[in-house]
Every structure is written in structure tokens, then in C-alpha cells.
Amino acid sequence: MADELAMAKLVPVQRGKTLGEYVYGQLKGALMSGTFQPGQKLSARSVADAVGVSFTPAREALSRLIAEGALETKGPKTVLVPRLTPERLFEITQIRLALEGLAAEQAGKQAEPPLIKALEEIQLQLVAAMDRQDYKMVLSENEAFHFALYSASGMPRLLAIIESLWLAIGPALNLLYPEFRLTRAGIGNHLAAIEALKSGDARGVRSAIQKDIEDGFAMLSKAILSLPEQT
């Protein structure tokens, strides 16, 4: 059932685009937004069927993501969404604090009213999804919030590096819920970032985003340690 629900998030291909690139983009977005769970199995055939392409571009997209470390192989035909170890989570978090903090601060230095309005609208959708306990949508809106902000930094190379970190961390964000819903720390941090943008406080935007990452790290660390040992 989980596999079927995750595959349903993939959008059928729009003809005219390079198939391999299109499938890669679909899978990359799904991983970053937490559509797939840690440890979930994928196959070229299931991806091809979900997106509406042949086996070859699906296999190429999976191979590319394996080479980037976003997926891993466990046998000749088994592809898995990796599970984060505490050590890898710590390393990724330290890098995220530096790079996403930088992107947030740069965005805060040049924020325009349309960005603030867009972030407020995303946040409304996030809160609505939280209220109805639609955690997949919460994760999707959370990703949208962060990358709308980071994109406003005007630093595309930095954005690409941050995307690579979210490829690794995205599936594990599923472990935050439903517990993270009780504290609503993420909602508070996003609202703090918006208020800092409104007041032109670029350092405040950085602080709010870094607090968001730190709060997630604290809960993810506990969740990962409580998982059963992998066999």
C-alpha cells in the first residue's frame, strides 16, 4: 500500500521532454519532499509504470540517483531508499545549518513582497495539512517553503548543493510525524522567518531557519535511534 501511494505522487510524463531527465526530476522531487519512506523498495518497472515511460529511462534515472548516493542497491534488482545513520544525520545537519542559513540570510537581504506573500500562502497550506494530519502534504509544503526562500537568494550553485542534501534527508523527514505535530515547532520557526523578512532582518531569517533545522535534528536523532536494527 505504501508503495502504491508513493508511486501515485509521480506525474505521467509530458511528451517533448527528455524522458530520462523527466523521470529523474520526478524521482528527485519525490525524494526531497519525503514522498518515499526510508527503506522503501523501488524498481525500474514500478517507476516506469507510474510515470508512463518505458523501462530504459526509468532505469537510467534510478542509476543516476544511485550514483549520487540518493538511492542504494541491495542486490541485482533491488533499489532502496537509504536509511540515515546517526552519524550521517549529524554530518548533513551541520552542513545544512551553514548552507541553508547562508541562503536564508541572502534571501532576507533582498526579499520582495511577492516572496513574503508566497511564503505566507505556502504556510497556510502547510498548517491546513497539519490540522487534517496529512503528513505527506505537510512535507511537500515544507519543502516548498524552504526552497521558495532559498531560491530568492539568487545563488543557483548554493541552491543545487542544498538540493543534494535534501535528497539525502528528505525520506527521513517522515520520521518526524506524527510526534512533530504536537510541538508545532516547525510552524513557529517558519512564522519567525516570515516576520524577519517583513522587518528586513536578514540575520533573523537565518536564525529562524537554523532553529528549524536544529529542532528537526533533535527529533530525528531520537527517531533514528529508536528504529529496529537493519538486517
Image (cartoon, rainbow, N blue to C red):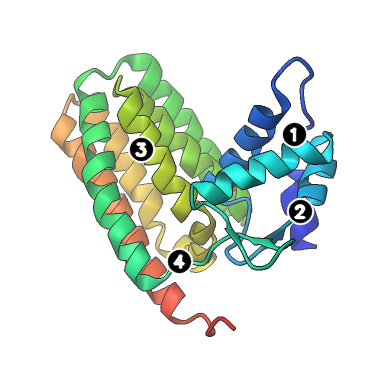
For the residues labelled 1 and 3, say whether their Cβ atoms are less than 8 Å apart: no
Which residue, given by chain and number where applicable, does mark 1 sit on?
11
Sequence-wise first label, 3 or 4 = 4
Instruction: Residue at 80%, 55% (x, y): give it.
Output: 4
Q: Secondary structure at mark 1?
A: loop
Disc number lying in front (1 or 3): 3
Q: Amino acid at mark 1?
A: Val
Badge 1: few (under 14), some or many (20 or more) residues near its Cα, within 10 Å? some
Disc number lying in front (3 or 2): 3
Instruction: Residue at 40%, 48% (x, y): give it.
Output: 187
For the residues labelled 1 and 2, say whether their Cβ atoms are less than 8 Å apart: no
Instruction: Work out whether residue 113 or residue 20 is closer to the camera in this orientation and state it.
Output: 20
Which residue, given by chain and number where applicable, does mark 4 sit on?
84
Q: Marks 4 and 2, how far apart in space? A: 22 Å
Disc number lying in front (4 or 1): 4
Q: Marks 1 and 2, how far apart in space? A: 12 Å
